[in-house]
Image: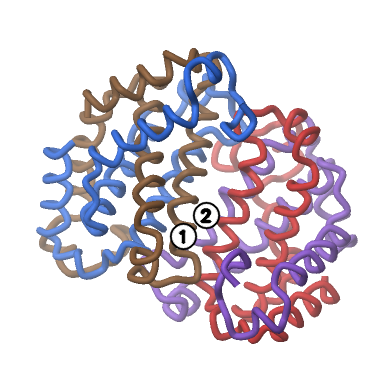
Chain colours: A blue, B brown, C red, D purple
Amino acid sequence: MEELQKQVIAFRDERNWKQFHNPKDVALSLSLEASELLENFQWKTSDEALTINKENIKDELADVVIYALLFADEAQIDLAKAVQQKIKKNALKYPVEKAKGNKSKYTEL
Amino acid sequence: MEELQKQVIAFRDERNWKQFHNPKDVALSLSLEASELLENFQWKTSDEALTINKENIKDELADVVIYALLFADEAQIDLAKAVQQKIKKNALKYPVEKAKGNKSKYTEL
Amino acid sequence: MEELQKQVIAFRDERNWKQFHNPKDVALSLSLEASELLENFQWKTSDEALTINKENIKDELADVVIYALLFADEAQIDLAKAVQQKIKKNALKYPVEKAKGNKSKYTEL
Amino acid sequence: MEELQKQVIAFRDERNWKQFHNPKDVALSLSLEASELLENFQWKTSDEALTINKENIKDELADVVIYALLFADEAQIDLAKAVQQKIKKNALKYPVEKAKGNKSKYTEL
């Protein structure tokens, strides 16, 4: 993940784009890319979407991750560490013995 | 990134949640988490948001990445490879000599 | 719709909130409310969601429309007229004889 | 609003599209259209966006309202009534004397 982040930052800096990238606008772009990923599933089942739109789905998912890496850099977040801490928090919210085979939200477990 | 993905998948499988995780619903959840990240910036500047909401911003960003890793697993996408291929595509769409210091979309460069 | 818009604007102006309501931030809020509506359907079928979350669904849908009315005011758009014009545009993109019983996008009809 | 909803429903029914329109997929489409509206403001100020993209902004806003009207029909919600009830709820959450000139969320007033 560090290696990918370096490539994404190099891409940004070669184009001198950091000046445009305040965290609010990067979070907005991340949200737009997540919608573009979801758009591939509009009026479709998962199987239909993956059969017809696989290449675009791959690209949009990559864009989501690219913006996540840029956002982490802008907001000075160690992304790998943040993910690991969040998995631990989620494990407390969703203990295996309560959540196993259960799709309820933690507030309803 | 592989290591993180293993942890995320282990979390899912311990809870026997794969049965609920079709790609469409995972993409939908990813989009919701991206909105929750963005919500931290509602009616705020980047600085205000990062001062007040830093901890929540970190958590929501992590959730976005967790869903991206789950989605990649469901849709059988090699995420690191997809990101690197997308960076290459973006480099063709935004050549340094045209895009440097310019925030226009590639269709307007 | 005009009557509803008057009520929404009166609500805003009694609180002296126009100063915060630039169109970009209102569009951002509209998008967040649309996500909160969608969140009611996360990991659920339509029927499950409407059975469990009907009251919240009603509220979030209303918030979407409230922000649409505010946005129209900020951006000086006649909303009823814009909707009627868009229905006409859509009718050209999706002629009855081609689109009947067909969920394809107009680019694929 | 009733008149607009009739037109939107007539448009749908002439194309025999009700069969595709379960509330979950309509809510998903509404959320996508809200993102497309917001996309007009990506990397732009409100003024820049409204100067350059006014026509598209109008269309995307109309699409949001069209999906809101369809959703209300599918989910059997009286939209005008829902909006008026929500304005009343909001008035309780944001009493004028506390909220005047204050952009804080109601939980922080």
Q: Is residue A52 above or below residue B17?
A: below
Q: Are marks 1 and 2 in contact (CB under 8 Å)?
A: yes
Instruction: Read off the residue under disc 2.
Output: D35
Quadrant showing the C terminus of chain C: top right
Depth check: D88 or C79 in front?
D88
Depth check: C80 or C14 in front?
C14
| Chain ID at mark 1 | D
Image quarter of residue C2 = bottom right
User: Of the residues shown, which amino acid type is indicated by label 2?
Assistant: Ser
- Asked if residue D35 lies left or right of residue B46, the reply is right
Q: Is residue D59 above or below residue B37?
A: below
| Chain ID at mark 2 | D
Q: Residues within 10 Å of mark 2 (few under 14, many from 20)?
A: many
Instruction: Read off the residue under disc 1.
Output: D39
Residue at screen point 56% across, 56% down:
C32
Image quarter of residue D29 = top right
- Asked if residue A37 lies left or right of residue D9, the reply is left
Locate residue D86, reporting x and y percent: 79, 62
Looking at the rendered structure, the secondary structure element under dot 1 is helix
Q: Is residue D63 above or below residue B90?
A: below
